[in-house]
Image: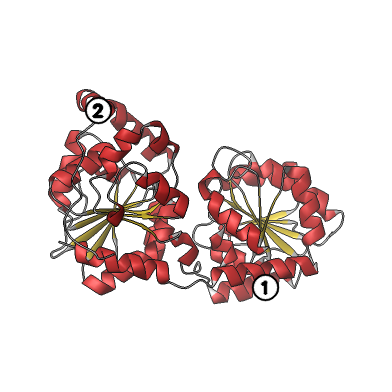
Amino acid sequence: MTGGTTPAPPQGLTAVLRLYMWATALAPSLLGNMARKGHLAQGADATRLAERFGHATVPRPAGRLIWINAASVGEVASSLDLARDLEAATGARLLFTTTTATGAETLARRLRQAIHQFQPVDTPTAVRAFLDHWKPDLACFMENDLWPRLMVETGKRQIPMAVINARASKTRTRAPRAMRALLSRAALISTQDAVTARQILNLGLDPARIIDTGDLKAAASPLPVDQDALHAMQNATRKRPVWVAASTHPGDETAVLAAHQATLRAHPDLLLILIPRHPARGAEIADMIHSAGLQSARRSQGGLPATQDQVYLADTLGETGLFYSLGPLVFLAGSFGDEGGHNPYEPATLGAAVLHGPRIANFKLAYAKLTQAGAAQQVRDADDLGARVASLIGSAQLEEMGKAACNLSNATDEARHTLLARLVPMLR
């Protein structure tokens, strides 16, 4: 397949999409109020709230501009290497939009040269103001975060569009005509797997515009690790056995702490490194640890784990790679509740074995690949988590799981290079 700049012939808007466009035009405050509340609830910079209504807070740079719409941390992480490749191949500047403050913080740490703005709400005034200011030369929508007006208005301006790393979606089954109308505006759609590619093909779209590159998360570079900080942690733990519970949400900590208490009976010197998804919850979680009768230290307060500490609360941003490198066994939270799981390739690329709960809809294929390779295992609940951690710590099986994780993660960059070859010719 060869790349091209000709946009896909757009399908007419369906009744569902016309109703959506009409409602959000007549009552823009519905989306605006949600955006305002979300911005404040995330603890985002209040002076940047205007960005969510299309008002830029920085000038547009001269020259060509590639816009990457990446909703949150996961989408940002999966797009970083591709973004660097695009920048190097074209010399264009990069503009990222996210809906979450954590996505913005991830970008600021890992791709500092990129411009960041919060994604505009899907109202006529906000979308038009955003596009009037930025005038992107290529628009890349990551995964399944497809807002109707944002895509329709981008297409009207004849800005080449690509949907990158798309995953399976129930919406395509429930509203196939509406999804066909939106996706027909994209000149290129890359998918995480063959199932998603077939799902999109079944909408009746041009097969030449659909490529199954595999999940970009699997080909992503490892999370950054500060070697000085790693050596300091290694010295502080003094070869104690360590396990990590990462990206915990409210409710997860109760299960994790119960599992750790049970595991301490078999491994009294075991250290749990607990990484909340949102570090702002650090004080709340510290109180939970204390109420559970466990000794702890907090990363945000500058402490290192002491001999008597049973839990190390890693309530900081940007250091997850450090703790994945330290602990050979990682439980990825967000898999007991409604969150849908988190990216298992991140610990796997750093050689950690992965445990997870049963609710992993967002990363089902990734976990299946890791499980098949022998690098991941599912646990049912807190009791099962405690039993599994106790049996794996210090075992030959854990060592084999770590090796399997490394082998699977040493995949080639073929997927990213294939995608790059299709995207570069699209840049108008």
Instruction: Tell me which residue sits at (78%, 63%) in the image.
Output: 393
Where residue 370 sits in the image (x, y, percent)? 61, 60
Instruction: Please rate how many residues cluster around mark 2, counting C-alpha atoms within 10 Å: few if below 14, some from 14 to 19, many from 20.
Output: some
Give left or right: position of 308 versus 426: right
Give left or right: position of 290 versus 412: right
Give left or right: position of 390 versus 14: right
Viewer-closest of 288 and 381:
381
**Tag 2 residue:** 24
Q: Quadrant of the N terminus?
A: bottom left
Instruction: Please rate how many residues cluster around mark 1, counting C-alpha atoms within 10 Å: few if below 14, some from 14 to 19, many from 20.
Output: few
Instruction: Tell me which residue sits at (78%, 44%) in the image.
Output: 383
Where residue 364 sits in the image (x, y, percent)? 55, 49
How many numbered dots are placed on residues in this image? 2
Q: Secondary structure at mark 2?
A: helix
Where residue 304 sits in the image (x, y, percent)? 65, 64
Instruction: Tell me which residue sits at (20%, 23%) in the image.
Output: 26
Q: Is residue 278 visible?
A: no
Q: Is residue 283 visible?
A: yes
Label 1 is placed on what type of residue? Gln
Label 2 is placed on what type of residue? Thr
Q: Secondary structure at mark 1?
A: helix
Distance of label 2 from label 1 (alpha carbons): 54 Å
Instruction: Tell me which residue sits at (33%, 64%) in the image.
Output: 419
Indicate the quadrant where residue 398 lies: bottom right
Q: Is residue 276 above or below residue 234?
A: above
**Tag 1 residue:** 234
